Every structure is written in structure tokens, then in C-alpha cells.
């Protein structure tokens, strides 16, 4: 269906653009991955751009959902800020990090002055986007997405008219610049391809044209043939997710291991595993809470450690990307600057992508479990039980593309998917459908809490027939009542009455059942209500911000009042809720 043309930027235009751009990147993802040779031929630029844009689009949708179905809609400022923030926290890889800064640069202009929602404002926004992205890269290189972004801004500045006219000029300028990238970067010319990041930006700008004109642009010139071995190089990537507090490595590596595992790791271990081919062995990415001065010092330090340094963001939140041999030092630099989290370290492969080598593929496992978990503690628990864990931090739910990647990483013929959150059911369903198109048999068990996922995983038996295993896991999850204890962020109407900001809420099966002032007392009331209906096992998952004594108090209460009931306690880490409770 054709889009309704718009002549100016508003929140609806932002929403439409994000949706169209996500679709365009989805269609071009495999092509872009295949031509990815710079700065590292790791075959993931299209995927990283898609995941980054998906995070931006999800954030915009959340803003619209917050306004409900009423007549009022979000402002342009609300929408572009959400888009920029979503891209920042979801940025993946070198290309995704630069795309996040491009969107942030546009948001800085469009959110600052409501009068800049016309063609003239779009010209300014595109210029700010290109300039801020170039400033974010420690050593800009021509023939890359930076060149394409600058060309788009230059072309837009020469266009007069509404947003559609300016967007089309930017698109054509970017398209022309993309075609010239092989002549600017020797590695592109040798491979016979255009720049992968620039190709992705052209797709995003094409979606901008369609959002304003309602007309789909002609596809960007198809990239030349895929680089031989690109797919194999992608499979050679070894990915490790680090949690700074736990200082443990979750290795769900290359798409050849059926399960992830957790093992302690030291900075010395990381240094010892460095590349011997002349290029950095690791890609390090993390979100960082820090001030401007600390980030300036961080840039200098990371610039001395490696290359492909990109630091984007502002207002206290940054996304840091760098290629290094000493991954531990890159993380420690972030610790000195502020609070790093969502740390992701990718090893470029034992055959090494710098030379195009790859390891032979391993046989797929028959069956695996992929689960979304809300905290680092549970991520370790699920991983030790043989599952591939996808960490969902508070306010940062995983996108469907991230779940699809986890399913691929599990490298199994059959996968059981546990979303562990009612709000992730549709996201998980979309991921399952995508995985099925790739020949993977996926069963989605609609778990609504991590404690239901624990119950399902406890009865998981890979030796059973797939259908039987899914039935048993579904039955165990369904027989587990779940609750959580949280702190109210604002005044609100609930099933238990009106709560005020700061009140302690006890939710049972998703509904507020208790409003209190004390965490332990509220948790005891919730537990009593759950056990009134009977139960044999109580599972407690304690978050970092819960009182240290709450688990002991609840265990004692179960021992004293419910003699036939057992209790098991896990530490959940930074999981959002103070306490998760499951009763089986």
C-alpha cells in the first residue's frame, strides 16, 4: 500500500520513516552482509544496521503506545528523541554505531525548534547528522558511510522545496557517492564492491523519500557480487558477552556451538588470545554512563589501544565501539570513565577475518533452548542449564532480530523459545517465524516470567521427541504462578487501589495485588496469597536493589508456615524487579 505523502516532519513521519527503513534494511540485509569488507570483513554490516534501526523503530512505537488511542499524538521532539535514544542503546557494530549518531544528529536539529519541520529544517538536520557522525569517528576514512552521509547533506543543501524534494536530493547524492566508493578505498576496489555501510544508508534515505512522497524510490544500484567466503567468514566470528560485575564470559560462539557456557576470564586471558595477523582480534562495544570530560579522556586512551574507534551519544549516555587486541584494557578504560554496561566483545575468529580464513562448520545440535532473561544472575543460571540466554535489561527489551540471532547461535535443528515476558510474546513470535523460514523447527512457549522459564527448563529433556518435550515444558510453565515486587514510578490506578510514586507493589500473575510501604512485608503478603492455593516449591529470584534480608525472611516464613513446601533462592543481578517469586 502506498504511503500518504507528507510535506513536513512530524511524529507520524518519523514513525513512517522508521518502519519503511526497517523494511528496506530487512530486504537488503543479506546483500549488505555479503559485501562487507571494511573495516573488517566479518559479514554483518547489514544485520547490524537492521538491529540498530529496529531498536530505533521500537522506541518510536513505544512513544506512540504511551499516548494510547486518543486524539493527541506525540510531538516531533518526542518522536525523534525516542528514535535517537533507541538507536543509541541498540547500536550494533561499527556501522550501527555510526547510524545511531546520524539519527542523533538529525534529532538535535528537529527536536530543538518546532519551526524546523520543513524542507529547510531537513537540510539542517542532514548536515548536522553528517558532521556529528564524522566527529564521532576517531580517524575518518573516505569511501565509507561517512562519505556517503556528507554527499547526502551536500546534495540536500542545494535543493529548494518541501521535505520530499530535499529527501530525494539527499538520496540521489548518497547514491552517486556510493557508486564512487570503490575508487576511494583500495579494499573495496580489490573486492569489487561498494561500501556496505554506505549501501545501508542509501536504503535508509530511500525510505525517507518514500515517507514524504508516498513513492518508492528505485533500488540503489545492486552491489556487485558477494565477496567469496563472506558467509564463511561470518560463521567464524566468536562472540562473548561480558558482564562487568560478574566478570564472567558467556561464550555462545560462532554459530557452531549448541549451548553457551560461563567461565571466569581474566584480562590476561584476553590479551593472550589476540590476533596474529596484524589486525585487532576483538570488537568491543558497550553503553557508558559518563560525563563529557571523562569521555574525552576515554577517546584518547582507546585511540591508543586499537582502531575503528567510534564514540557516539551525549547527555551522560554513550555508545562506545573499538577494535582492539586487549579487550580487557578497553573495558577497564570504560570503568575508569564511568559505568559501562551491555558489554559485548566479539572475537573475529580463529581463522581470522583479516585474512578471510574460516573454521570448518560443526554439526548442528538436535535441540536447544533460547531464553530471554532479565538479569545477569539468571543469565548465568540459564546458561549453566544449557540454554542460550538473551539478556534483557530494564527498559531495554530485545528486538526480534536479536532473538533470531540467538536462535541461529544456538545452532540446533530444533529450538524451544522462552520469552519470559508477556510483552515479548509478539516479538518472540516474529523471531520464531523468521527462524522457521531458515529451516529451523521452533516452538514458542509463552512464558510470562523468568520463574516460569526456570520451571520449563527444569523438565527439559533433549532425548524426548520434540513435541513431547514442548508439551512437558509448557505444562511445567503453566503450573507455575508468578509474582514480582517492584517500586511504583508514578501515581497510578491499579487493581488494588491507587498507588503513589515510591510505593512497593506486589504483582501476582501480572496484576497489582498488594500496595505497601516495606519491601519485605509486601513480599510476605504476596507469598502468603500465592501459597493459599497450594504449592510444593517456591522459587525466589532476588535483585540487586532488594534488601539483603528479604530472602532469609521469606525462607523462614515458608519453613514455619508451609511445612511441605521447599524454597530455592537465586541472585538475579540488575533485573528491574526487586524480587521475582514462583510457586509450583
Image (cartoon, grey):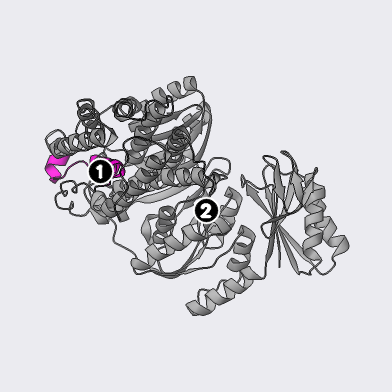
Q: Is residue 127 magenta?
A: no
User: CA–CA distance between discs 2 and 1?
Assistant: 43 Å
> Within 10 Å of the Cα at label 2, are there few (<14), some (14-19), or many (20+) other Cα atoms?
some
Magenta region, main secondary structure: helix
The residue lying toward the viewer, choosing from 234 and 95, is: 95
Q: Earlier in the sequence, mark 2 or mark 1?
A: 1
Q: Are marks 2 and 1 in contact (CB under 8 Å)?
A: no
| 499 relative position to 72: left or right | right
Span highlighted in magenta in the image: 188-214
> Where's residue 284, x and y in %?
41, 39
| 80 relative position to 493: left or right | left
The residue lying toward the viewer, choosing from 64 and 50, is: 64
Is residue 143 something that shows in the picture? yes
Q: Indicate the quadrant containing the C terminus: top left, top right, bottom left or bottom right.
A: bottom right
Residue at image mark 2: 262
Q: In the displayed structure, would residue 582 be above or below residue 487?
A: below
Q: Give the SS element for disc 1.
A: helix
Which mark identifies residue 206? 1
Q: Residue at x 37, y 41 (%)?
A: 13
Amino acid at each position: 500500500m502506498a504511503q500518504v505523502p507528507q510535506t513536513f516532519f512530524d511524529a507520524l513521519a518519523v514513525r513512517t520513516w522508521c518502519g519503511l527503513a526497517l523494511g528496506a534494511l530487512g530486504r537488503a540485509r543479506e546483500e549488505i552482509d555479503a559485501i562487507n569488507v571494511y573495516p573488517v570483513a566479518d559479514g554483518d554490516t547489514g544485520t547490524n544496521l537492521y538491529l540498530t534501526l529496529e531498536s530505533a523503530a521500537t522506541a518510536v512505537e513505544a512513544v506512540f503506545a504511551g499516548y494510547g488511542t486518543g486524539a493527541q499524538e506525540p510531538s516531533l521532539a518526542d518522536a525523534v528523541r525516542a528514535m535517537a535514544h533507541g538507536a543509541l542503546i541498540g547500536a550494533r557494530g561499527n556501522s550501527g554505531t555510526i547510524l545511531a549518531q546520524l539519527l542523533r544528529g538529525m534529532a538535535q536539529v528537529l527536536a530543538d525548534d518546532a519551526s524546523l519541520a520543513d524542507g529547510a529544517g531537513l537540510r539542517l538536520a542532514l548536515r548536522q547528522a553528517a558532521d556529528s557522525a564524522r566527529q564521532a569517528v576517531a580517524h575518518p576514512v573516505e569511501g565509507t558511510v561517512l562519505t556517503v552521509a556528507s554527499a547526502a547533506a551536500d546534495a540536500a543543501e542545494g535543493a529548494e522545496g518541501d521535505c520530499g524534494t530535499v529527501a530525494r536530493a539527499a538520496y540521489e547524492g548518497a547514491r552517486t557517492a556510493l557508486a564512487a566508493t570503490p575508487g576511494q578505498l583500495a579494499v573495496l576496489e580489490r573486492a569489487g564492491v561498494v561500501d556496505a555501510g554506505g549501501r545501508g544508508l542509501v536504503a535508509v534515505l530511500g525510505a525517507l523519500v518514500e515517507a514524504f512522497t508516498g513513492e518508492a524510490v528505485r533500488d540503489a544500484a545492486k552491489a556487485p557480487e558477494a565477496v567469496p567466503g563472506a558467509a564463511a567468514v561470518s560463521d567464524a566470528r566468536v562472540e562473548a558477552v561480558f558482564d562487568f560485575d560478574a566478570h564472567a564470559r558467556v561464550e555462545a560462539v560462532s554459530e557452531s556451538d549448541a549451548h553457551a557456557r560461563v567461565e571466569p576470564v581474566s584480562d590476561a586471558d584476553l590479551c593472550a588470545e589476540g590476533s596474529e595477523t596484524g589486525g585487532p582480534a576483538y570488537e568491543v562495544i558497550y553503553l557508558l554512563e559518563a560525563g563529557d570530560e571523562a569521555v574525552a579522556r576515554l577517546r584518547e586512551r582507546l585511540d591508543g589501544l586499537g582502531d575503528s574507534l567510534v564514540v557516539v551519544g551525549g547527555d551522560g549516555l554513550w555508545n562506545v565501539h573499538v577494535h582492539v587486541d586487549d579487550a580487557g584494557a578497553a573495558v577497564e578504560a570504560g570503568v575508569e570513565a564511568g559505568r559501562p554496561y551491555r558489554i559485548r566483545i566479539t572475537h573475529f575468529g580463529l581463522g581470522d577475518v583479516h585474512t578471510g580464513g574460516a573454521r570448518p562448520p560443526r554439526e548442528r545440535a538436535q535441540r536447544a533452548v533460547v531464553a530471554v532473561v532479565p538479569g545477569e544472575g539468571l543469565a548465568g543460571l540459564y546458561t549453566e542449564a544449557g540454554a542460550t540466554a538473551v539478556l534483557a535489561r530494564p527498559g531495554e527489551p530485545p528486538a526480534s532480530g536479536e532473538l533470531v540471532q540467538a536462535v541461529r547461535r544456538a545452532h540446533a535443528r530444533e529450538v524451544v523459545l522462552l520469552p519470559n515476558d508477556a510483552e515479548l510474546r509478539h516479538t518472540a513470535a516474529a523471531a520464531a517465524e523468521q527462524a522457521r523460514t531458515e529451516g529451523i523447527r521452533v516452538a514458542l512457549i509463552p512464558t510470562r516470567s523468568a520463574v516460569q522459564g526456570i520451571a520449563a527448563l527444569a523438565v527439559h529433556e533433549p532425548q524426548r521427541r520434540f513435541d513431547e518435550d514442548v508439551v512437558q515444558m509448557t505444562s511445567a510453565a503453566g503450573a507455575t504462578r508468578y509474582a514480582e515486587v517492584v517500586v511504583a514510578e508514578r501515581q497510578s490506578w491499579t487493581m488494588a487501589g491507587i498507588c503513589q510514586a515510591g510505593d512497593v507493589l506486589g504483582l501476582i500473575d501480572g496484576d497489582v495485588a498488594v500496595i505497601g510501604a516495606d519491601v519485605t512485608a509486601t513480599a510476605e503478603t504476596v507469598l502468603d496469597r500465592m501459597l493459599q492455593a497450594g504449592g510444593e516449591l517456591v522459587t525466589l529470584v532476588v535483585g540487586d536493589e532488594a534488601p539483603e534480608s528479604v530472602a532469609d525472611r521469606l525462607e523462614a516464613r515458608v519453613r514455619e508456615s508451609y511445612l511441605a513446601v521447599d524454597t530455592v533462592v537465586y541472585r538475579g543481578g540488575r533485573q528491574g524487579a526487586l524480587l521475582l517469586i514462583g510457586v509450583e
